Structure formats: structure tokens, C-alpha cells
Amino acid sequence: MFDSLTDRLDDVFRKIRGHARLTEENVQTALREVRLALLEADVNFKVVKDFVERVRERAMGQDVLKSLTPGQQVVKIVHEEMIELLGGQAQELDLKASPAVIMVVGLQGSGKTTTCAKLALKLRREFKRKPYLVPADVYRPAAIDQLHKLASQLDIPAFPSTPDQNPVDICLAALEEARRSGHDVVLLDTAGRLHIDQTLMDELAAIKAGTNPGEILFVADAMTGQDAVTVAAAFNERLDVSGIVLTKMDGDARGGAALSVRQVTGKAIKFVGTGEKVADLEVFHPDRAASRILGMGDILTLIEKAQTDVDADEAAAMERKLRKAEFTLEDFRTQMRRVKKLGSLEGLLKLIPGMSQVRKQLGEVQMPEKEMGRVEAIINSMTKAERATPKLINTSRRERIARGSGTTVLEVSQLLKNFTQMQKMMQRMMGGKGMPSMPKMPP
Ligand code: GDP
């Protein structure tokens, strides 16, 4: 996300921070480079012009240039203006109605169906809501099936629509069903087209009129850059959308759509899709995104990621097991899967301030994901009994496990050795008592 833009701006700011004193000339040069970096990132031309103008006005003042840290002041101004450009405050969803209706619209392939499922999961997990999914895309073949599949994977109920039904009828019947079955938020996955067309817009307007949604979220593929912005403006004109979801931010190194869409449409980005998995949807925080773009990291998102989905009961059970040396390879695998769910380690590193630079210096270092995949494959090839009692795993079993996981006997043995060592170490640390006992410090 934003990688190439971050790199470019980082160079500009390093130069400007290096000066003990700044002249108007220095600032002009830096702003020219900022302008170029934004244009290269495919930010809308007019948005860039206004942005640079606003920064220039504030940065040229004597209080900035004569201050003790002029370079930092300029960076601070860019940061503040970027937060504004991205929308200022994070925008909440309007979920007041009962059931609250969220209508999801956008072109075909933008990620609507996936976003509906992701959003439903988020609403249940973080907002403690009872979501109901409604497949109302009767044109794209398999769209209804796709949403049903995702729904059953997440164990979230979905309305049993069929392609021969009228979309408005589907939405109205689904709303009735949600009311009857006690669901408090309804997500309408509407049809898209490859291009904007009148019939589609009429249909969406009819759904809007019939269901009176609290939210109309326009979904756009961030990788399409300025096209996404143009389409957003067209949808907004006809439907007066309430917010924007930018998908595929994981593949968008430039950030042109993210930086332009708010200014061009006047509507806030509410969520961003950051991967293909159902958990890959983040609330969009303009301040955090601005920090990320300027290479300052994003600690808050990192903490939130680590906290999502931590179940207090499960954590307590794990602790008990560790204490009693009952932590098995099965538990080990569960923990490893949990770490994997946080997303790529590469992505996590970027959230730590200053890490983008460190990462660059490290070059092509192997991230541990591959190793984790191998370890998981080995554990998967064991029987339940073997996972519970690794001592059972003799030579012939090791050969079988290596074959089953596409690894070598050596790798299986190494994993078992590491696991035994880890168990011993944990035992020592936990001391079998209430508090972990720390090694004694020499007096
Ligand atoms: P729809 O036609 O608008 O309903 O689009 P889909 O929901 O079927 O999504 C189209 C494709 O984009 C699918 O292959 C999704 O997995 C993929 N996709 C959706 N959101 C994201 C995202 O945030 N990141 C990535 N990498 N892929 C995504």
C-alpha cells in the first residue's frame, strides 16, 4: 500500500530535514518534488495543484522558516494537509435504523461481493451486530453462489435469492425476512456492469427508493487509479452515496485513487480492502494513512490487528496448558495459524515507524512465512495422537510424515527437536506456579 509514493516522499523529506535553515527556495524545490511524486502516484491533477498550493501558503511563513526545526515544520504541514485531503476524521457507519440497511454498489469486478462478506464479518466481530447478507446481483453468473459460499464459510445467514427474481423484490423480501429473524443489519450486494449504464443506475435507484438504506457504499478497485475516481463521481451523482470502499489496496503501490477520491467526490473513504481473505478489511483512518504515506508507520493499526479475534477464554486455556506442560503440537499449529491471520509479516513490518527504511536496507531478506508454511505442512501430516504425544514419532513415522508434507526426515526431526526445546524452556519460565519465575539476577 502506497509503497512507491512513500519512497519518493521519503527522499524529498530527508533532503529538507537535512537543512538546519531553510530558504524559500529550498521549500519551493521540495514542493516541486512533492508535486511530481503525487502526479506520478496518479493523483488527480487538480487535487495535486490545490494540495501543493495549501502547503505552500502555510510553509512559506516566516514562523516556519525562522523556526528552530524548519524541515520538521514543513513535514508536519504536509502531514496535516494530507490528513485533510484523505478526509480528516474517520467516518462511522450509520447503523441507526433497525434493521440498518447497507447497500453496496460498484462496477463488476471491483470487489463488491467480497466486500459484503468482509463487512458482515467485521460487523459481527467488532460491532457485535447480527448481519444478514442479501445476494441481489442477478446478472453476473455465479455472484449469488459466491456470496452464499462466503456466507456459509463465515456462518452468517444469507437470503435465498435466485437469478430469475427481480432485484428490488429480492431486497424488499430480504428486509422483511431480516426483521422477522431478528437481524439488525442487512447488506445488499447489488449488480454491477463493466461500464456505467443507465439501466443499472435505474435499478440501483429503485433499490435505494425501496429500502431506504442508511449507507450506500461505493466499492472501487484502487488499482484502477483515476478511473475509479471518475466512476465514483458518476455513481455519487446519481445515487448520492454515503461513503467509499477502496479495494485491492494491497496491490496499489501508488495511491492515486485513495488520495483523489475524497476531494473529487466530497465523500469519505470508509473502508479499505487489503487482501483477498475475509478478514482483510480495515476501517479507513485518514490520520493513520497519512502517517503511512509519509513513512511514519501506523502503530495503532498494528495494535488493533493483534487484538482482533483474541478470545479471552482461549488465551486462559492456552496459559493453563503451558503451565502444565500440556501444550501440544496441535496448540502450536493453532497459534501459528493465528499469527498468519494477521496478514503478511512484510505488511506488519510496514506499520512500525521507521521500518520502511530498515526494510529497504535489508533488501531481499526471506520473510519467515515460507518456513511457517513448511512447519504447518509437517504438523498437518501427523496423526492426532502424534500431535498430542510427539514421543510416539519414531523413525518410520518420521519418514511417513516427511513424505506426506513434501519435506525431509531431517526437517521433521528438526521441528520435533525445536518443539521439545521450546516446551522445556516454557516449563522453566512458567515454573509451574502462579507467576512466571524470572531467572535470578546476579547481585
Ligand atoms: P464483484 O464483481 O464486484 O462482486 O467482485 P468480487 O467480489 O467477485 O471480487 C473480484 C476479485 O477481486 C476477486 O477475485 C476478489 O478476491 C478480489 N478482491 C476483492 N477485494 C480485494 C482486495 O482487497 N484485495 C485483493 N488482493 N483482492 C481483492
Image: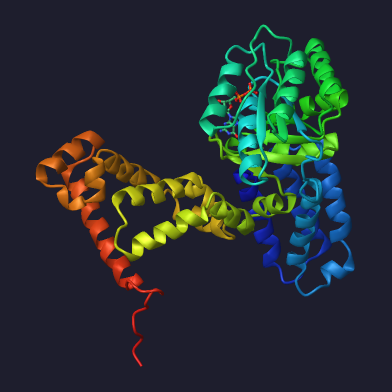
Question: Is 181 left, or right, of 424 in this rendering?
Answer: right
Total marks placed:
0
In this rendering, position of residue 379 left or right of residue 47 = left
Residue 274 is drawn in which quadrant?
top right
Residue at 81% in and 29% down: 213
Does residue 347 lie above or below 401 as drawn?
below
Q: Residue furthest bottom?
A: 443
> In front here: 235 or 213?
213
Task: State the image coordinates of residue 5 (x, y, percent, origin top left).
Answer: 65, 45
**In screen coordinates, is 330 left or right of 301?**
left
Report whether residue 75 is seen. yes
Q: What is the quadrant of the C terminus in the image?
A: bottom left
Along the line of sight, the residue nearer the viewer: 124 or 300? 124
The quadrant in which residue 47 appears is top right
Q: Is residue 260 above or below residue 441?
A: above
Residue 365 seen in this snapshot = no
Task: Name the residue located 19 percent from the left edge and 35 percent from the top edge.
Answer: 403
Q: Work out which residue is located at the far top of the displayed protein and give it.
A: 164
What residue sits 82% from the left and 37% below the top?
267
The residue nearer to you, when weighing 160 against 76, is 160
**Where's residue 122, x and y in %?**
63, 41
Quarter holding the N terminus is top right
Colour option used: rainbow
Quadrant position of ligand 1: top right
Task: Give the farthest residue toward the front.
Answer: 180
197, above or below 280, in the image:
above
- Residue 3, given in percent of the width and then of the height, sits at 60, 45
Return the x and y of residue 244 as percentages of the image width and height: 75, 35
